[in-house]
Image: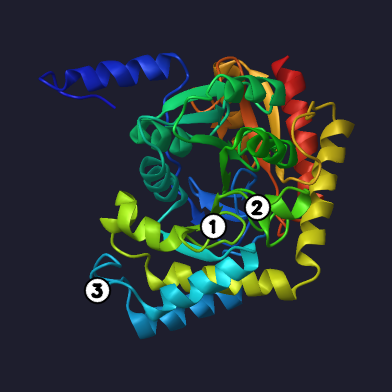
């Protein structure tokens, strides 16, 4: 990529610098054939880096629901929900999501990013202190910045550090603890029970991003796997395990109407299109009615971890019931090379490099779904082991 000299030539300089540092990002154009295979550069590859953890994106029930509701309601909503874009479908699905999540109310949002940015910017103020896990997602970080609160970052999942931050913030108007439930790059879980205890001790509110947990750890998200009471606000993503699009913010009775009036990303955005909303609702029904879906995912996770170990690939990070298995290689250029060699062999695992992850922790973020073939998973692990041995 090259630009003609001129006022915007600095863009070309920046792109060259990123390329030299092995950090240039370019999207791959995929044409999916099914839940786990896609055409990429004129060949079929097995995708092992997505977030479709339950393999539902191509499920006939989801496709049928999305098509039917699109025919009835239209391809979009035509306006913000506070004008003329609030569909009966939105209200119905919000009520269903709230019930599944064990919350009083839910508010649909166009994406998890929009949900986090809009909610945190509205909830926080200059006199507040927000305690943020060091590995929180960019959308959480951006929302906290817009909220203009004092942000105190604590070491990842370090409850002693969180306690210290809370103890130093006693003069704040409000205190918030913000964390992911399931961390998307490391595949580990936040200690939500311990966080709840500290929040109670220091009179702090809790905001938990469950974009990657919702559906993976059961319909209730992270909360279903620990003994913690529900956070004040939870963000549930529909674009990961549910195989749809959009997100929801869930919480107490006042949260939904309060966000109607204060979340700028909700107020000033066109309503979520009907298709993804219907698909998300159908995904919740599939998850409820298919008793083999989650066990199948768990079996594939075990197959991946066991196979990686058999072929000498270190994959010690992450929770054993989570489909995110980071293979940390450290060096950016080496990670990109390994990814390229895997692609040559028919395995698509995108390299993850800074600033998405901390310096020195470039990795392959390997993911499996309930739809993957265990034989393919084992073949991938064998190939990865061979590539890493050749790389040294």
Residue beneath disc 3: 84
Residue 31 relative to residue 216: left or right: left
As helix, strand or loop, the secondary structure at mark 1 comes to strand
Mark 2 crowdedness (10 Å alpha carbons): few <14, some 14-19, many ≥20: many
Mark 1 crowdedness (10 Å alpha carbons): few <14, some 14-19, many ≥20: many
Discs 3/1, front: 1
Query: Which label's residue is closer to the chain start, 3 or 1?
Result: 3
> At 70% across and 26% down in the image, what residue appears?
159
Q: How far apart are labels 1 and 2 at the CA level?
A: 8 Å
Res 251 label? 1
Nearer the observer, 207 or 279: 207
Q: How far apart are labels 2 and 3 at the CA level?
A: 33 Å
> At 79% across and 26% down in the image, what residue appears?
314
| Cβ–Cβ under 8 Å for marks 1 and 2 | yes
Nearer the observer, 356 or 138: 138
Q: How far apart are labels 3 and 1 at the CA level?
A: 25 Å
Quadrant housing the C terminus? top right
Mark 3 crowdedness (10 Å alpha carbons): few <14, some 14-19, many ≥20: few
- Residue 82 location, x and y as percent? 27, 67
Res 230 label? 2
Residue 233 relative to residue 14: left or right: right
Residue 373 relative to residue 21: left or right: right
- Residue 390 location, x and y as percent? 73, 19
Query: Which label's residue is closer to the chain start, 1 or 2?
Result: 2
- Residue 20 location, x and y as percent? 42, 14
Q: Is residue 102 visible?
A: yes
Q: Is residue 345 visible?
A: no
As helix, strand or loop, the secondary structure at mark 2 comes to loop
Query: Which label's residue is closer to the chain start, 2 or 3?
Result: 3
In the rendered image, the residue lying farthest to the left is: 6
Quadrant housing the N terminus? top left
As helix, strand or loop, the secondary structure at mark 3 comes to loop
């Amino acid at each position: 990529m090259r630009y003609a000299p001129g006022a915007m030539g600095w863009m070309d300089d920046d792109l060259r610098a990123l390329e030299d540092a092995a950090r240039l990002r370019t999207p791959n154009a995929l044409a999916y054939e099914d839940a786990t295979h896609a055409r990429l550069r004129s060949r079929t590859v097995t995708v092992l880096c997505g977030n479709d953890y339950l393999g539902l994106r191509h499920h006939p029930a989801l496709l049928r629901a999305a098509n039917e509701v699109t025919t009835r309601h239209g391809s979009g909503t035509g306006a913000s929900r506070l004008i003329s874009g609030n569909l009966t479908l939105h209200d119905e699905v919000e009520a269903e999501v709230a019930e599944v999540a064990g919350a009083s109310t839910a508010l649909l949002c166009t994406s998890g990013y929009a949900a986090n940015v809009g909610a945190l910017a509205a909830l926080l103020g200059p006199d507040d202190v927000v305690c943020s896990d060091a590995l929180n997602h960019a959308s959480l970080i951006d929302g906290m910045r817009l909220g203009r609160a004092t942000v105190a970052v604590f070491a990842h999942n370090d409850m002693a550090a969180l306690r210290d931050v809370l103890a130093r913030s006693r003069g704040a108007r409000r205190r918030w603890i913000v964390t992911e439930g399931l961390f998307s790059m490391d595949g580990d879980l936040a200690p939500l029970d311990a966080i709840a205890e500290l929040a109670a001790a220091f009179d702090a509110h809790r905001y938990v991003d469950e974009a990657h947990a919702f559906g993976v750890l059961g319909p209730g998200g992270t909360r279903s796997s620990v003994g913690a009471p529900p956070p004040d606000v939870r963000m549930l993503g529909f674009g990961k395990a549910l195989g749809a699009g959009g997100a929801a913010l869930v919480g107490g009775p006042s949260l939904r109407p309060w966000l109607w009036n204060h979340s700028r990303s909700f107020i000033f955005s066109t309503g979520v299109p009907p298709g993804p909303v219907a698909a998300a609702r159908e995904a919740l029904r599939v998850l409820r009615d298919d008793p083999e879906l989650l066990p199948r995912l768990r079996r594939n996770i075990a197959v991946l971890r066991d196979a990686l170990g058999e072929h000498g690939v270190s994959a010690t990070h992450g929770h054993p019931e989570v489909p995110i298995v980071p293979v940390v290689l450290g060096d950016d250029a080496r990670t990109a090379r390994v990814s390229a060699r895997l692609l040559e062999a028919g395995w698509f695992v995108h390299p993850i490099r800074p600033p998405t992850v901390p310096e020195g922790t470039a990795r392959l973020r390997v993911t499996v779904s309930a739809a993957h073939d265990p034989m393919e998973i084992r073949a991938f692990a064998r190939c990865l082991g061979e590539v890493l041995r050749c790389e040294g």
